[in-house]
Amino acid sequence: MSATAKPPAQRRRRMPRAERERQMIEVAESVFAERGYAAASMDEIAERVGVSKPMLYEYFQSKEGLLLACIQAARSSLREATEQAVLGATTAEEALRKGLLAFFEFVRDHRQAWSLLRHETSLVGTSAADEIEVTRRQQTDLIASLMSGYLNVSDPTLTHAMAEFVVGGCERLAIWCEQDEKITPQAATDYTMNLLWGGLRHLA
């Protein structure tokens, strides 16, 4: 071994591509949430990750491509959280309550991801805005599909209308929870169920 060569234990471990990509997305999510998409820079993201800016471009092609990856990761996490929450539910009321609680807990525990999903006005004209709408459709389709298995409804447009109502209302309620931290995920779920379930109970 030469005098200048580092022994194996001292060499920097090469991070697997998938792990490096997750790290880049997590850091970018933080920067986008802190600065907003327009003000965020690839230079700062690269510096925080500890990689070169060309490497960021190698992985994501552009700043918008990196933002899309962040939104897609947030959408995947949200879907997993809500799907896992309703497993084992035996009634429509239980399934809806568990799904709502999972959403509000996601908002509380993943503030940066939620920030990306709700700040769509700054993204108008970009493909990221379309990705956010895909996230909404994911949740409305998930709720409509879940409820159709529990509710005695012959018209699928009714369950879809209910799902759109839930998603839109929960978005606004989640913003309220952000502004008033005394409103817990459980409290937000209770408010939503108290307002919503009365109109759905007769269909169960």
Image (cartoon, rainbow, N blue to C red):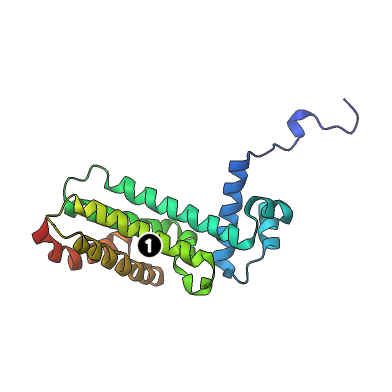
Say which quadrant the N terminus sits in.
Answer: top right
Q: Where residue 125 sits in the image (x, y, percent)?
A: 53, 72
Q: Is residue 153 above or below residue 88?
A: below
Residue 64 falls in image quadrant? bottom right
Nearest the camera: 103 or 72? 72
Q: In the image, what residue type sits under mark 1?
A: Arg
Which residue is found at the position 54% from the left and 55% from the top? 69
Nearest the camera: 55 or 47? 55
Q: Is residue 86 visible?
A: yes
Q: Where residue 116 sits in the image (x, y, percent)?
A: 49, 64
Task: Name the residue carrying label 1.
Answer: 136
Q: Is residue 100 above or below residue 178?
A: above
Q: Where residue 172 sits in the image (x, y, percent)?
A: 34, 71
Which residue is found at the position 23% from the left and 42% from the top? 88
Residue 156 horizontal side relative to residue 135, left or right: left
Nearest the camera: 112 or 166? 166
Q: Where residue 3 sits in the image (x, y, percent)?
A: 91, 30
Instruction: State the SS at label 1.
Output: helix
Which residue is found at the position 57% from the left and 53% from the top? 25
- Looking at the image, the residue that sits furthest to the left is 202
Residue 96 falls in image quadrant? bottom left
